[in-house]
Amino acid sequence: MRTAQQSLPHAGTFHVTAHERVVFGMPAEQAVLAEVERCGARRVLLSSTRSLTRLESGPLQRLEKALGTRHAGTFAAIRSHSPREDVVAGANAAREVEADLIVAVGGGSVIDATKAMLLCLWHGLDAPEAMEPYRSGFDRGYNRAIVQPADPVRMVSVSTTLSASEFTDSAGITHVPTNTKQSFRHRLFAPRCVILDPAATLDTPDWLLFSTGIRAVDHAVETYCSPRASLVTEALSLLGLKLLHRALPAIKHNPRDLAPRLEAQIGMWQAIAPSAAGVPTGASHGIGYVLGSTFGVAHGHTSCVMLPAVLQWNAEVEANAGRQAALSEAMGAPARAASELVKALIADLDQPVTLRAVGLKREDLDEVARRALGYHPVKVNPRPVASEADVKQILELAW
């Protein structure tokens, strides 16, 4: 009989998010209407980005039409990297129309901003600086308790990219004065319903779909390689990687075929599940936060340029090299290095593979290295990153 002092090698904790359902393969309009009926919403605000308003009959327009009289308004001014200013403006728009449900239509920036809009609605925050005490911080002493009201406004998501923000309860928000990516977290920030309609991705530009697909690959790879991976999460990471590695080239080969698009959506769901369950990512994500918030590199492109370099740098540690062999097998080429396979996939999708290709200058690298050390994923990278010099080694591989 096991005593209280004994521990099993695979003991751990799997955090369960507050999603109520995931609807996949169904038209978004049908799925949203069903969710509106289920929760009794009467005044629905759609949150989105300006690029989706320019379509004649895209997912945003189809939802506005389908909602009919329950469409209370559309706030479509959320910019890349979810600035606090856009979060507050969106919350103010929701207050103005007395929204009782918010449906986020878009990619990671829209979904993250909408999560943080809930914070502003729950706590009556109406200025960017008012959000400061509520941000989570691993060592900064923040994270004032976020308390939802008795009947909190919740959100539903309709994904147009493969960034997978909809599967977590954390919102990555940019603090513009410092160009820093910050996190706000609450269990009920997770959308009550996630809707994965492959047709909603048809109008997404190829570069955005494919780069966020690589972001999903990054989720799978870094959670599998994490020292905190478990028997439960490892299978999810590998399945997500396998599906994405197969689906992304298939989408490029036949762009109008919905089947590989749905497979990619399922893959990004599986790939993010370990992270949502509590497994941290690594240096590719952490350095990517700097590239995005400080230098304006698109979310997906940060993974395109950093993941192969981080894999190559991490492979010098024997334990991680063994993990990477499993990644290569999941991608169908066990004899090749995982870093090479990921880089080849990125190049085949016509996405950038170097820091130069996304506009970085050599004189920027010192600032990237300095800022990167402040991000938690860098601190828990499977190969310890102990100094700016270590970050610079990774950046040189990505240069």
Image: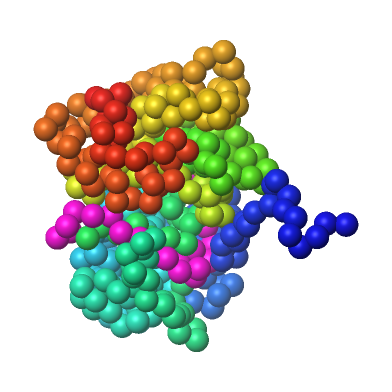
> Over which residues does the magenta segment extend?
176-200
Q: Can residue 96 be seen in this view?
A: yes
Residue 191 is one of the magenta-drawn residues = yes
Residue 123 is one of the magenta-drawn residues = no
Which color scheme did the rendering employ for the protein?
rainbow
Along the horizontal axis of the image, is 36 left or right of 93?
A: right
Q: Residue at horizontal 42%, vertical 65%?
A: 185
Give the image location of residue 38, x and y in percent: 59, 72
Give the image location of residue 205, x and y in percent: 32, 37
- Total marks shown come to 0
Q: Which residue lies furthest to the right in this view?
A: 1
Give the image location of residue 201, x and y in percent: 42, 43
Q: Is residue 269 visible?
A: no
| Quadrant in which the C terminus is drawn | top left
Along the horizontal axis of the image, is 379 left or right of 32?
A: left
Give the image location of residue 124, x and y in percent: 31, 83
| Quadrant in which the N terminus is drawn | bottom right
Q: Which residue lies furthest to the bottom in this view?
A: 150
Q: Residue at horizontal 34%, vertical 70%?
A: 142
Q: In which quarter of the image is residue 246?
A: top right
Q: Residue furthest front?
A: 5
Q: Residue at horizontal 41%, vertical 69%?
A: 102
